[in-house]
Image (tube, grey):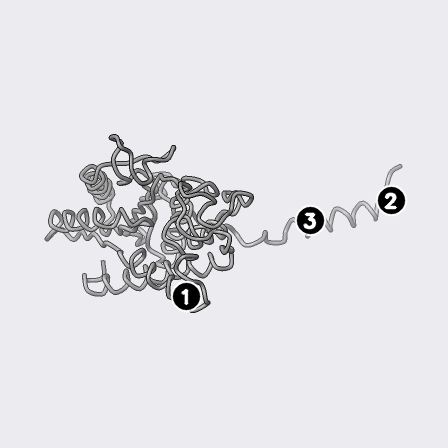
Amino acid sequence: MRLPFFTMMALLLAGTRADAQPNAAKAAPPVFIDELTWMEIRDRMLAGTKTAIIGTAGQEQKGPHMVTGEHKYVLTHTTERIARTLGDALVAPIITYVPEGSWEAPLRGHMAKAGSITLPEDRFIELLVHAAKSLRAGGFTTVILIGDSGGNQNGMKAAADQLNAAWKETGGRALFIGDYYTKSAEDIRAYLGKLGFPMEAIGSHAGMVDTSELLFVNPALVRRDRLAPSGGSPDSGVNGDPTKATAAFGKALVQIKIDNALAQIRALRATTGGF
């Protein structure tokens, strides 16, 4: 049955008005370099974006309840937030191959578990230096090094020292942001301690802290049916009690990392001529 003429016109006008309404908030432009074309990166640099963030994660066991890429997923979230807050930074692809021990027998630590991948310290430093020099050649004047794992910290500092020595008098700077990990680890323990959690629950690996952070940034990657204190067995790879983890805690803990990183970046920029 055909609709009356005036009914049809009313529907058409209503549809036109609806189409004319602005869409929901337009998605913010990407800050990850690998999500941009080279011309888009060039244009962002011409508009004042001269800082590149290199994040180092880790490909390592995270107990029976978390995926081995936990550090990468957390760092993807935090580096994006840091870059967007700074307003003049882009994020390089996350580096996941980092020092995790040796592949030679007897295997120890994370390397004793399937799926962990290690890189010798000297090769890790070399990788960082070459990545940073590549970004510098492309026009970035500042490279920020941030790591989400304890084993990455010394190598990142060494790489930053090498880069600053090589870039002396050229206007380039490398900033190692150790507070993201070291200061934050202390602040997180203090925060959870004040809430009444003992150190054996907080843990040092794949326990309450790591699990809370992943529950916040990507909960689908936590196997909730495998949560157990100390991972459920002596050889689980877990130190702490992941059953105490929540996404709400994860949100607070991730924010501690972001805030500490931003504070150190701003302080270092203020003492290096604004780079």
Percent from the top left, x then y, of residue 27?
50, 50
Q: Which mark is residue 16?
A: 3
Q: Which residue is the site of mark 1? A: 193
Mark 3–mark 1 distance (CA, rounded to whole Å)? 58 Å
Amino acid type assigned to the residue bearing label 1 in the image? Gly
- Is residue 123 positioned above or below 55 on the image? above
Mark 1–mark 2 distance (CA, rounded to whole Å)? 71 Å
Secondary structure beneath label 1: helix
User: Is label 3 in contact with label 1 (beta carbons under 8 Å)?
Assistant: no
Percent from the top left, x then y, of residue 81?
40, 55
- Is residue 126 positioned above or below 15 on the image? above
Q: Nearer the viewer, residue 248 or 132?
A: 248
Mark 3–mark 2 distance (CA, rounded to whole Å)? 19 Å
Residue 172, can we see it? yes
Query: Count of labels shown?
Result: 3
Label 2 Cα neighbours within 10 Å, binned few <14 / some 14-19 / many ≥20: few
Q: Residue at x 68, y 51 (%)?
A: 18
Quarter of the image with the C terminus in it:
bottom left
Amino acid type assigned to the residue bearing label 3 in the image? Thr
Q: Which residue is the site of mark 2? A: 4
Percent from the top left, x then y, of residue 59?
35, 39
Secondary structure beneath label 2: loop
Q: Earlier in the sequence, mark 1 or mark 2?
A: 2
